[in-house]
Amino acid sequence: MSTHPRPAGPGPAERVATLDASDLHLLRLVADGHTAAGTATRLDVSERTVRRRLRDVCDRLDVHSPIEAVVLAVRHGRI
């Protein structure tokens, strides 16, 4: 067992800073209560694309749900 501390990864603020305008727009739609189907219609993409993009954003932010992603983005002043 190693006693050396592992280097810390990027913190929440750094992860939120990686979100681009389209990621933030997607999270705003989630925050406004739009379903994946409604978001897909608004963005003129498939529902599958919306779900994939939300999963990607959640993975990059290291959260478990789109709601957690919204909360993190709000806490850090991005939406």
Image (spheres, rainbow, N blue to C red):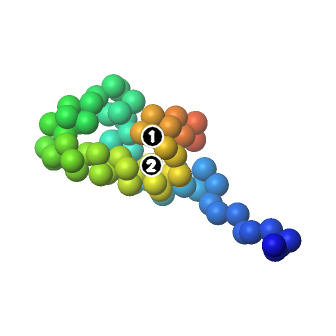
Taking the image as shown, residue 62 lies to the left or right of residue 5, namely left
Q: Are marks 2 and 1 in contact (CB under 8 Å)?
A: yes
Q: Nearer the viewer, residue 16 or 54?
A: 54
| Residue for badge 1 | 65
Residue 8 in percent (x, y) is at 70, 63
Q: Nearer the viewer, residue 78 or 8?
A: 8
Does the image show residue 58?
yes
- 45 lies above or below 30: below
- 15 lies above or below 26: below
| Residue for badge 2 | 58
For the point 33% across and 25% down, which residue is it? 33
- Quarter of the figure with residue 15: bottom right
The amino acid beneath tag 1 is Ser
Residue 10 in percent (x, y) is at 62, 60
For the point 25% across and 36% down, which residue is it? 36
Taking the image as shown, residue 42 lies to the left or right of residue 1, namely left
